[in-house]
Image: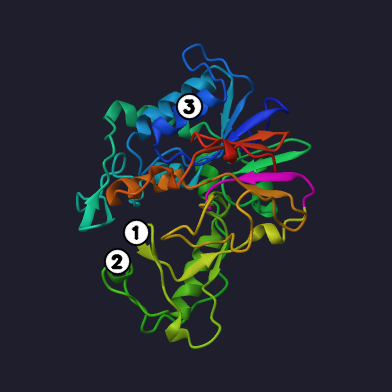
Amino acid sequence: MTLVRPFLHDRVDIIGDIHGEIEALERLLGRLHVDIARGRAERPLIFVGDLVDRGPDSVAVVELIQHLVNEKIAQVVLGNHEHNLLRGEEKEGNGWFVDHADGADCFPGPSGPQLFASRVATSDEKEKIRRFLLSLPVALESRELRVVHADWFPEDIEAAREVGDYSAFDALRRCAATEFDLRGAPDEVAIRNYAVPLPYHHGLACQHAADQNREPIRVLLSGREKPLRTAGDPSEIPVPFLSGKHRFAERARWWREDDDERAVVFGHYWRRLEGRNRGKMDVFEGIDPLAWFGKRRQAFCVDYSVGKRFEARAYGRDLREGALAALRWPERTLLFDTDTERFATRL
């Protein structure tokens, strides 16, 4: 079976990144008139990936969504957070599933490092989750619509069409064409130390972007990258600390080059309804939070940062800073887990 699959139906509700926020998911499904117990829905559901990590109960989120998939009323594409679990990679917020070498899975809290308050999966739960994730595609498509977690890169989509096995696709690499000057570059320990600011290093930025773009699965699930903008004095370029490490490369706005006439809906990029997204690279600067965008105004990001609620809890902020969204297709209507009706906006 290919890793790029067709939609079950041409009328769907496309749900953004959940990140273990089980209460938000249950509330949104209620607003979409989904009967979870009976496995019934007003229309099929599409989940864009990043079901897990950071939130209070990733296990419950995956179990609920697997139930909906088994009832044939939902489809799911892999996100980069699911990919990290399958690889066993230590990432911010995934200590509920992956054993971290130092035993701690922390984020910079209001009074120092703070543990993620996430339910830890049992061995049996981990195995069930792993089997479910291995069954998922990396993209869905129809004649009018495409869904991927982060980046619809045609070359890598075509590669995924030819591969029916996650492990085989994960093993694909592009040849390294360039070696970069890494003299004076910080080591991995420094890169992951949020307490010490780091100066920009262009060779390291080029290497990080090349490493990301070399792997087809990472491109589709995490997006292409490029070195941080280098206008002016490189020593004055701020190096942000995001998701557990200093970032010398930034996300490419691939939708500006996307020449496919079909609509493309994705998650991953931390959109906000109001204000800026603290601690995240804003690729939507100048774009209305409810607008379609891209070369043909064909692109829409449905990730409205519900995954930031772990931080809102720690800092005592309003949990409605982020929201879990569903895009109703083909109506192009948005619905959120919040009770604020003005956000149920037709685009």
Pick whichever, 343 or 139, lies toward us: 343
Q: In terms of secondary structure, where does tag 3 sit?
A: helix
* Residue 244's disc number: 1
- Residue 4 at x, y percent in the picture: 65, 38
Q: Is residue 266 magenta?
A: yes
Residue type highlighted by circle 3: Ile
Quadrant occupied by the C terminus: top right
The residue positioned 26% from the left and 41% from the top of the image is 117
Q: Earlier in the sequence, mark 3 or mark 1?
A: 3
Could you tell me what secondary structure mostly forms the magenta stretch? loop
Numbered mark located on residue 65 in the image? 3
Neighbourhood count class around disc 2 (C-alpha, 10 Å): few under 14, some 14–19, many 20 upward = some
- Depth order, front residue of 273/242: 273
What is the spatial separation of the Cα atoms under label 3 and label 2, in whole angstroms?
34 Å
Give, as a three-letter code, the residue at label 1.
Gly
Marks 2 & 1, CB-CB < 8 Å contact: yes
Horizontal and vertical percent for residue 118? Answer: 29, 39
